[in-house]
Amino acid sequence: MNYENILFDTANNIATITLNRPQTLNAFTEAMIAETTHAFRQAGRDEGVRCVVITGNGRAFSSGQNLAEVQERAGQFSIGEHLRKGYNQLIRQMVRLEKPVIGAINGIAAGAGCGIALAADIRIASDKAGFMLAFSKIGLVPDSGINWFLPRLIGYARAYEMALTAAKIPADTALAWGMVNRVVPHEQLMETAAAWARSVASGPTLAYGLTKRAMNKSWRMSLDEALDYEAHLQEVCGRSQDNQEGIEAFLKKREARFSGK
């Protein structure tokens, strides 16, 4: 697939997806949603990819949905279908991808752009980044997974406040609230994200992926179910090359050389 709205690069076991409509602050069109979803699917299928980084080109991570596209299709546009066929598929692709996803949040992440950022497993934010739920300004409810992700990260009261006020939450506040893992100077963002990605891409990819699966499933499980599921996944990991390598490296007091299998 030829991408016109994103950049997609793979190198050193890392796939980098860059939202690339800087003239619109990387506002999502249907084509850009489809391309981003396809890129995540490609990263999942590529055994050589062991980590994915998603970021934005220019001043913004993403300003959310391109409302001009919606207005152009007035009377023929179903928001529900747009979500089901577009953003919902992208969010599911990100969450179900059993490889770590690092969000390098370079600027504002607003509306659906905020949902995409929250779907990343690790979020590293520039000190120029911000998060905003602008939906109430146009009489809509948050979507793109925000109602699921955000209260779990920062609690119901703060999440609902963000939805009501549509206030911009700066990076330092997002860090204090638990929305992001790190805040770094803007000029160091991509260098920091690349260092994290290199470290993760050299790790036990199978274990990382199954850990992600276990934590996501645990929201719907009782403690007993979670314990049983952990035992099942541990059996899978216990038969992996990475587990054998990790044990051998530990016993020989050397650094493990994981293959991701």
Image: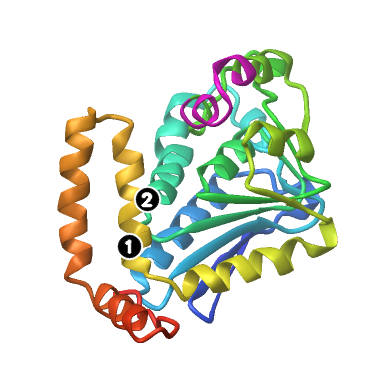
Question: Which residue shows up at 20% across the image and 54% down it?
Answer: 233
Q: Nearer the viewer, residue 255 or 253?
A: 253
The residue nearer to you, when weighing 54 against 50, is 50
Disc on res. 212: 2
| Residue 254 image offset from top left, x and y in percent | 43, 85
Q: Secondary structure at mark 1?
A: helix
> Residue 113's quadrant in the figure?
top right
| Membership of 58 in magenta stretch | no
Give the image's coloring scheme: rainbow
Q: Secondary structure at mark 2?
A: helix
Q: Is residue 78 visible?
A: no
The three-letter amino acid code for the residue at tag 1 is: Ala
Residue 250 shows up from this direction = yes
Q: Position of residue 217 (x, y in %)?
A: 29, 39
In-front residue for pair 220/75: 220
Task: Give the magenta-colored segment's residue range.
Answer: 148-159
Side of 12 relative to 61 (left or right): left
Q: Alpha-carbon neighbours of circle 2 within 10 Å: few (<14), some, or many (≥20)?
A: some
- Seen in the picture, residue 187 relative to 82 is either above or below; the reply is below
Q: Amino acid at mark 2?
A: Lys
Residue 65: give x, y in percent of width and height.
63, 36
The percent coordinates of residue 110 (x first, y second) are: 69, 35
Residue at 52% across, 73% down: 14
- The residue at the point 41 percent across, 47 percent down is 95
Q: Which residue is mark 1?
A: 207
- In the image: residue 250, left or right of residue 236: right
Give the main secondary structure, helix, strand or loop, of the magenta stretch: helix
Answer with mark 2 or mark 1, whichever residue precedes in sequence. 1
- Label 2 and label 1: CA atoms lie apart by 9 Å
Q: Is residue 237 left or right of residue 117?
A: left
